[in-house]
Image: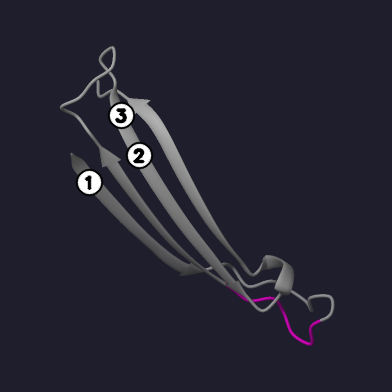
């Protein structure tokens, strides 16, 4: 089993002007985490199974852009 993880964090570019309904410009900060597990010692037609999980949190002072997402992917992969 080959684990891999990645963490991303950063500010989005500042928006110009006022956001509708707010007394200031929109500000966003994005935090992301990705983890991938690959089982290379088990293959199906030469392809190794892989499980990936991705989490993303967008912190925003605008309610419609303040969100959290989770993704799970199951796939087959091959190294060349």
Report, in whole angstroms, how far the alpha carbon at label 2 lies from the one at label 1.
Answer: 10 Å
Binning the other alpha carbons within 10 Å of mark 3 as few (below 14), some (14 to 19) or many (20 upward) gives some
Local secondary structure at mark 1: strand
Pick whichever of labels 2 and 1 is earlier in the sequence: 1
Residue at which label 3 appears: 49
Q: Which residues are magenta?
A: 22-28
The number of callouts visible is 3
Q: Is residue 64 magenta?
A: no
Above or below residue 34? Residue 24 is below
Local secondary structure at mark 3: strand
Binning the other alpha carbons within 10 Å of mark 2 as few (below 14), some (14 to 19) or many (20 upward) gives some
Residue 65 image point, x, y percent: 68, 66
Along the line of sight, the residue nearer the viewer: 18 or 75: 75
Instruction: Residue at 79% x, 87% y: name it.
Output: 23
Q: Is residue 76 left or right of residue 60?
A: left
Report, in whole angstroms, how far the alpha carbon at label 3 lies from the one at label 1.
Answer: 12 Å
Residue 75 image point, x, y percent: 39, 30
Residue 21 image point, x, y percent: 84, 80
Instruction: Residue at 35% x, 61% y: name it.
Output: 7
Above or below residue 61? Residue 2 is above
Residue at which label 1 appears: 3
Residue 79 image point, x, y percent: 25, 24
Question: Split into 4 quadrants, where in the image is the N terminus?
Answer: top left
The disc placed on residue 51 is: 2
Q: Quadrant of residue 19?
A: bottom right
């Amino acid at each position: 089993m080959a684990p891999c993880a990645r963490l991303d964090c950063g500010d989005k570019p500042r928006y110009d002007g006022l956001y509708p309904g707010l007394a200031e410009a929109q500000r966003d900060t994005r935090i992301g985490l990705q983890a991938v597990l690959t089982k290379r010692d088990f293959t199906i037609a030469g392809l190794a199974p892989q499980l990936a999980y991705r989490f993303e949190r967008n912190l925003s002072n605008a309610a419609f852009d303040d969100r959290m997402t989770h993704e799970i992917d199951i796939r087959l992969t091959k190294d060349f």
